[in-house]
Image (cartoon, rainbow, N blue to C red):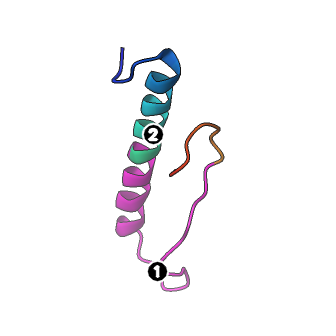
Amino acid sequence: MSEGETLEEAIDNINEAIVGCLRSRLRTASEKIFINALPSHIRIDLDIPGISNA
């Protein structure tokens, strides 16, 4: 089981890891795209229940 004392904590930790992975992949992909029309900073909100700092 992932780190966490309960199943809910383990699921929260897995969800946070997935969000972190997605952020990293989006950052890498955005660095490979060079389009002047896009803003340099884009905030992407993911609605995932149970994660407070996503």
Magenta range is: 21-46
Mark 2 / mark 1, whichever is N-terminal: 2
Query: Residue at point 42% right, 32% down?
Result: 13
Q: Nearer the viewer, residue 44 or 1?
A: 1
- Above/below status of 13 relative to 46: above
Quadrant of the rendered image containing residue 42: bottom right
- Above/below status of 45 relative to 17: below
Quadrant of the rendered image containing residue 21: top left
Q: Which residue is mark 2?
A: 16
Residue 32, magenta (yes or no): yes
Place of residue 24 in the rendered image (x, y in percent of width and height, measured from the top left): 37, 53
Q: Nearer the viewer, residue 38 or 50?
A: 50
Give the residue type that dot 2 points to: Glu
Q: Which residue is mark 1?
A: 40
The dot on residue 2 is none
Q: Nearer the viewer, residue 16 or 44?
A: 16
Report the Cα–Cα distance between label 2 and label 1: 25 Å
- Above/below status of 19 relative to 24: above
Callout 2: few (<14), some (14-19), or many (20+) C-alpha neighbours within 10 Å? Answer: some
Give the residue type that dot 1 points to: Ser
Query: Residue at point 57% right, 61% down?
Result: 44
Callout 1: few (<14), some (14-19), or many (20+) C-alpha neighbours within 10 Å? Answer: few
